[in-house]
Image: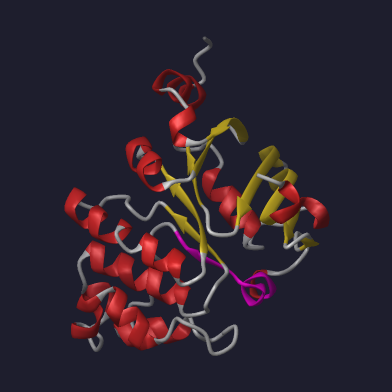
């Protein structure tokens, strides 16, 4: 693919927590219409990368571009207003609010009158329509994840970042969650998915990046990456 047509890119991206360096020269590209998966063990830097892209973790101004424009120095609200939304690890729902109120928070920064409305979210996840007046944190783990995804979609993002959306969920629930991905892409969002589950990542992604200790150790299409190469990149085993 031609990098000049990239939707989102990181360029030699570094990130720090105080004096601790968490990311070391990460280069990543997301093209319009793609699903990119990022895999790696705990502590590999996957969540830090997501937090950097969304403006939560400070980065050099030119280290992240959207449509070729530098967004690395923007605040998290400004990045969201540009069309980059995240489904955070652990969901981070508001326990005092209903399902519908949590969803409506996602529409606070809204990019025009586009596809994702409450009705569209309820069509995507019908169980949420039935539970719309329930406390969001009273739902099952899978239903809470649906709320978190719906909340992010309510801003009508161009880029959707999903951080560990299958973590702790039963296989059947994970299948239902990931069944929404093609519909989300059809509606116009390109997706970056952080996954510890290598098999799930390979099933859903157009391209895969593997990270270890804050660095990209492997990149390619699922078809081009052998299990051995993924294993070595994931665990740092020399060939």
Which corner quadrant of the image does residue 65 belong to?
bottom right
Q: In this picture, which residue range is highlighted in magenta?
A: 78-88
- Horizontal side of 228 relative to 190 (left or right) equals left
Residue at the image position 21 percent from the left and 74 percent from the top: 138
Residue at the image position 43 percent from the left and 22 percent from the top: 226
Residue at far front of view:
1
> Residue 128: x percent and y percent?
25, 79
Residue at the image position 72 percent from the left and 47 percent from the top: 3
Query: Looking at this view, is 37 or 220 the one in front?
Result: 220
In this figure, which colouring scheme has been used for the structure?
A: secondary structure
Query: Looking at this view, is 57 or 194 the one in front?
Result: 194
- Horizontal side of 112 relative to 129 (left or right) equals right
> Residue 24: x percent and y percent?
70, 36
> Residue 33: x percent and y percent?
53, 59
Query: Looking at this view, is 182 or 171 the one in front?
Result: 182
Based on the picture, tell me whether residue 167 belongs to the magenta stretch: no
């Amino acid at each position: 693919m031609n990098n000049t047509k990239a939707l989102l890119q990181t360029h030699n991206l570094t990130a720090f927590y105080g004096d601790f360096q968490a990311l070391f020269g990460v280069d990543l590209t997301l093209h319009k219409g793609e699903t990119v998966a990022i895999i790696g063990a705990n502590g590999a830097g996957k969540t830090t990368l997501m937090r950097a892209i969304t403006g939560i973790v400070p980065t050099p101004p030119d280290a992240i571009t959207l449509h070729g424009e530098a967004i690395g120095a923007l605040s998290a609200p400004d990045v969201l207003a540009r069309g980059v939304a995240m489904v955070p690890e652990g969901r981070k729902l508001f326990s005092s609010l209903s399902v519908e109120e949590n969803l409506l928070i996602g529409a606070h920064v809204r990019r025009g009158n586009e596809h994702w409305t409450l009705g569209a979210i309820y069509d995507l996840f019908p169980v949420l329509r039935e539970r719309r007046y329930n406390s969001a944190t009273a739902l099952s783990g899978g239903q809470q994840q649906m709320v978190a995804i719906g909340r992010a979609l309510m801003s009508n993002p161009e880029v959707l970042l999903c951080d560990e959306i299958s973590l702790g969920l039963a296989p059947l629930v994970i299948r239902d969650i990931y069944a929404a991905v093609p519909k989300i892409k059809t509606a116009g969002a390109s997706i970056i998915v952080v996954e510890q589950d290598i098999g799930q990542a390979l099933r859903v992604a157009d391209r895969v990046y593997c990270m270890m200790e804050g660095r990209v150790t492997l990149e390619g299409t699922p078809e081009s990456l052998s299990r051995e190469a993924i294993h070595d990149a994931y665990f740092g085993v020399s060939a």
